Amino acid sequence: MSLKETTHKFAHSSMYDALLAYIVSLLLLPRLVMKTDRLVIRRFCMDDAAVCFAFMSDEQGMYLDGCKPFHEMDDEYWERMKLFEQREGQYVIVLQSTNEVVGTINVFADDSRVVDSKEIGYAISPKHQRNGYAFEAISAILNLLQKDLLIDMVVAGVLPENIPSINLLEKLGFSREGMRQKALWHEGLDKPVDLM
């Protein structure tokens, strides 16, 4: 086989693999259930809404996520939970040992890139922080996205003052691209903020 024929065959094989990975991601991500050593990552459902209030009402955590905290499970809270339920990439992080929801992780399309890319976001309940759950969950999601689904790039936006999250992302292999100016409408501050 000539070099031209080999290159042509490889190009079609890579294109086929990428197309297959894309189709699998469309089918898999909305139905994802994934286990790690200590965690289960599964799609959010309305049964999780009451438990999520623990971190959706945390002042500091919600500020760092760009949201305003909820002070009660009012109509606005339940509307947000309905939105979570409708999002195909909205997952909860559950402890295998107790079946307790300890956080959320979401995966959504990043249409600002010319390559197939996803953006992730995450939150861990204050009482469960500093146990490595975010690292474990994000590692599993990254492995799925990059190795199994062949996603070219995974990004995460973070407020510049969220040093623990910046450190976590760097530990996971993320690198700083710079500052995205006015990239997020911060509900708690009621103004646009920059993200790293």
Image (spheres, grey):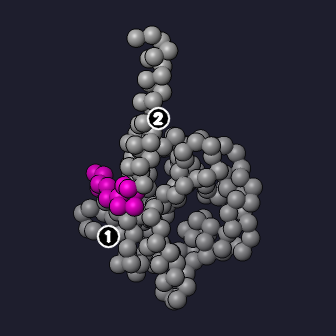
Percent position of residue 167, x then y = 55, 48
Toward the viewer: 51 or 18? 18
Note whether residue 41 is visible: no
Q: Tell me the quarter of the image containing the N terminus.
A: top left
Earlier in the chain: of badge 2 and badge 1, it is 2
Percent position of residue 47, x then y = 35, 78
Q: Amino acid at mark 1?
A: Glu
Badge 1 element: loop
**74 over 169 or under it: above or below:** below
Residue 20, disc: none
Note whether residue 178 is visible: yes
Q: Residue at x 62, y 43 (%)?
A: 114
Q: Amino acid at mark 2?
A: Met
Percent position of residue 41, x then y = 35, 59
Q: Residues within 10 Å of mark 2 (few under 14, many from 20)?
A: few
Answer whether labels 2 and 1 touch (C-beta < 8 Å).
no
Which stretch did the figure color magenta?
27-39
Kindly give the residue lying farthest to the top in the view shown. 2
**25 over 100 or under it: above or below:** above
**148 over 130 or under it: above or below:** above
Task: Please give the count of numbered marks on the rendered protein.
Answer: 2
Which residue has dot 2 on it? 15
Which residue has dot 1 on it? 100
Residue 59 falls in which quadrant of the image? bottom right
Q: Does the stretch in magenta take in 51?
A: no
Residue 149 falls in which quadrant of the image? top left
